[in-house]
Image: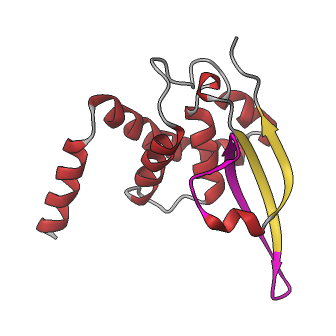
Amino acid sequence: MASATARLLRRALALSGRERLLFLRAWIMLLAVPSALRLLPFRRVLALLETPTMSRGGQPIDAERLADLVDAAGRHHLFTPTCLHRALVLYGLLSPRDGGAELILGTRRVGGKLEAHAWLEQAGSVLPAAPVSGSYQPLLRWKRERAR
């Protein structure tokens, strides 16, 4: 247990100050998003995530790196967030200046069961990089406007 804690602390200290803040912001948003989805219509949650106060300021950050930070926040959370929660948090953290990621919700049939998945795409790349998204049929695509 002590070695796992020490390893986690070393990894946290290896992050830049900006990355630590983004990790913390993602962790907090992973608490807020599930509650927002229970209390508000989906489009209202998206609108809240698109507000200028939700997108972080400063220089654009690599979308893959930001996806890794959101993923790490999910792995070290109080509960296991769903792909929808992670995708919405990443969508909210990505600034329109970062290239305007598209939120995608898709489904597939596996053995007679319907499965759903949420992910982001940006400039043809899947965020977070996961091969599973290719087998899902997109049902909803949502893209915010780029900042001018």
Q: Quadrant of the N terminus?
A: bottom left
Which residue occupies the foreground of this view, 54 or 107? 107
Q: Is residue 83 above or below residue 54?
A: below
Residue 85 x, y percent position in the rendering: 61, 51
- Name the chief secondary structure element in magenta: strand
- Residue 116 visible in the snapshot: no
- Residue 80 visible in the snapshot: yes
Q: Residue furthest top?
A: 148
Residue 114 x, y percent position in the rendering: 83, 75
Q: How is the image coloured?
A: secondary structure
Residue 89 x, y percent position in the rendering: 58, 42
Tell me what residue is drawn at x 76 percent, y 49 percent: 104
Q: Is residue 108 magenta?
A: no
Q: In the picture provided, is 104 more to the left or to the right than 87?
A: right
Q: Residue furthest bottom?
A: 111
Residue 41 x, y percent position in the rendering: 80, 40
The count of marks equals 0
Tell me what residue is drawn at x 54 percent, y 58 percent: 81
Q: In the picture provided, is 135 more to the left or to the right than 80?
A: right
Tell me what residue is drawn at x 72 percent, y 62 percent: 117
Q: Which quadrant of the view contains residue 83?
A: bottom right
Q: Quadrant of the C terminus?
A: top right
Q: Is residue 123 magenta?
A: yes
Q: Residue furthest front?
A: 124
Q: Which residues are magenta?
A: 109-130
